[in-house]
Image (cartoon, rainbow, N blue to C red):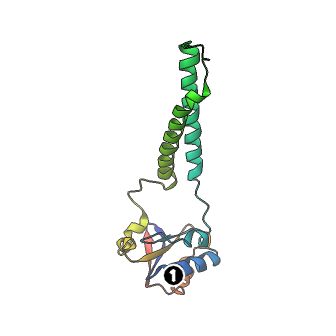
Amino acid sequence: MSELYGLIAEFDSADDLVKAAERTRSAGYFRFDAYSPFAIDELPEVMDLDPPRIWLFVLVGAAGGTFIAFAGQYYALVINYPMNIGGRPFFSLPAFVPIIFELAVLGAAVCGVIGMFVLNRLPMPYHPVFNHPDFADSSRDRFFLCIEARDPHFKLEQTRDFLHTLDPLEVTHVDT
């Protein structure tokens, strides 16, 4: 017998899903997720989600690219192979700027993509909600709200009764 992952409720519209998420949060549930065929701007605020931290990955990538570009050019042109051309100084920051900029952008882009995969926990070839028979409709025209069994307030019968008060099309259990 498989272990219970949670209870999932199916809704007909985005407004119903937002109202259900708002009531779920105000009822004290913290471990729940909403699934929809498109982004709903109100959901992150209603669900009280943390702001995205992708900016941190991008910042680290840009800083790393800047450092690598500066250090590489400085080592190559000042320390390892200095050339006196026309009496110019070995270290000339304006000449370094284009390479520094390009590697900063490259580092930010690469770390941004890596951060997107890490923060979204991708690739995710399996998730327990995929077991719901109608979950494929979440990419077309249905909206789902799943309360996980590991939520501190989760009690099977009380949570099922609560989900029924939200007027869903149906409430079913999700196994792992």
Q: Which residue is at a point 48% across and 54% down the rendered structure image?
A: 121
- Residue that carries the numbered disc 1 in the rendered image: 15
Classify 20 as above or below 102: below
Classify 119 as above or below 102: below
* Residue 78 percent coordinates (x, y): 58, 17
In the figure, residue 129 lies in which quadrant? bottom left
Q: Which residue is at a point 35% across and 71% down the rendered structure image?
A: 136
In the figure, residue 65 lies in which quadrant? top right
Query: 15 or 124: which is nearer to us?
Result: 15
Q: Count the marks: how many?
A: 1
Q: Secondary structure at mark 1?
A: helix
User: Counting other residues with Cα less than 10 Å from the Cα at mark 1, is it few (<14), some (14-19), or many (20 or more)?
Assistant: few
In the figure, residue 140 lies in which quadrant? bottom left
Classify 55 as above or below 159: above
* Residue 171 percent coordinates (x, y): 45, 81
Quadrant that contains the C terminus: bottom left
Quadrant that contains the N terminus: bottom left
> What is the three-letter code of the residue carrying label 1?
Asp
Query: 60 or 81: which is nearer to us?
Result: 81
Q: Which residue is at a point 49% across and 45% down the rendered structure image?
A: 109
* Residue 155 percent coordinates (x, y): 57, 76
Query: 118 or 98: which is nearer to us?
Result: 98
Classify 43 as above or below 85: below
Q: Residue furthest front?
A: 86
* Residue 9 percent coordinates (x, y): 47, 79
